[in-house]
Amino acid sequence: MWNKLKLLLIILSLTLNIAFLVSWVEYRFRVSSLCTAGETPSEVTLTQGCPLHSKLCVTKEQSQQLEPEFAKFRQQHREICRKVGNNRREIIELLASADPNLQTIRLKQEEIITCQRKMQDLVIEQLQLQKHVLTSEQQKMLFELIAKLDGCASHQERR
C-alpha cells in the first residue's frame, strides 16, 4: 500500500513540476544583457505576457507573432492545471476515506497522467511555434535556459 502511495505522490509531483515549469519560465525572466548587439531594452518589446520573451529580447514584430499563440497557451495551461488540481484533491479525499476505492484512485491517476501528456504536448507545440519565429541566437538562448530548468533536479539526491 505504501509503495502505491509513493508512486502516486511521484506521479503527482512530476505532473505539477511540468505545470509549474512553464509558469516559472513565464514569470522568472526579465530584460537583461542577453540582448543582441546594438539592441537596447527600449528597442525590445517588453511582452506583458511573457518575461521570457523579454529575456530573449524579442522584437515588436516577433512579439506580434508570438503573443496571440502564447495567450492561447496560457489559457490551455491554466485549464490543464485546474484539472490536475481537481484530480489531485479527489485522490486525497479518496485516500482519506475510511475505505478507499483503489479502482477509482487508479482512474484518477490515469486522468492525471493524461493531463501530464497534454501539458507536455502543449509545451512542445509552443516551443515549436517559438522556434519558427525566433532567430537562431534567440533559439539557442531559449533552449539553454530551458536546459537549466531541470524540473527533476530538486528530487535528485545531493552528493
Image (cartoon, rainbow, N blue to C red):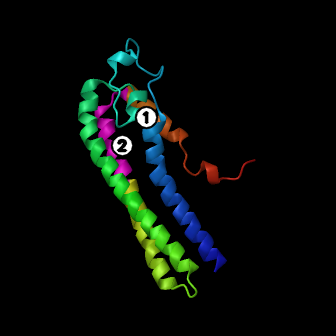
Number of residues whose C-alpha sits closer than 10 Å to that of mark 1, classed few (under 14), some (14–19) or many (20 or more): some
Give me the residue at 54% from left, 49% from top.
151
The image quarter in which residue 43 lies:
top left
Where does residue 141 sit, x and y in percent of width and height? 45, 30
Tag of residue 142 = 1
Q: Toward the viewer: 16 or 62?
A: 16
Instruction: Tell me, yes or no, if residue 84 can be seen here.
Output: yes
Amino acid type, label 2: Leu
Amino acid type, label 1: Leu
Residue 124 highlighted magenta (yes or no):
yes
Give me the residue at 32% from left, 48% from top.
73
Residue 5 highlighted magenta (yes or no):
no
Tag of residue 127 = 2
Where does residue 128 sit, x and y in percent of width and height? 32, 43
Q: Toward the viewer: 43 or 92?
A: 92
| Mark 2 touches mark 1? (CB < 8 Å) | yes
- Please state the extent of the stretch shown in magenta in the rendering: 121-136
Q: Is residue 136 above or below residue 102?
A: above
Q: Toward the viewer: 58 or 159?
A: 58
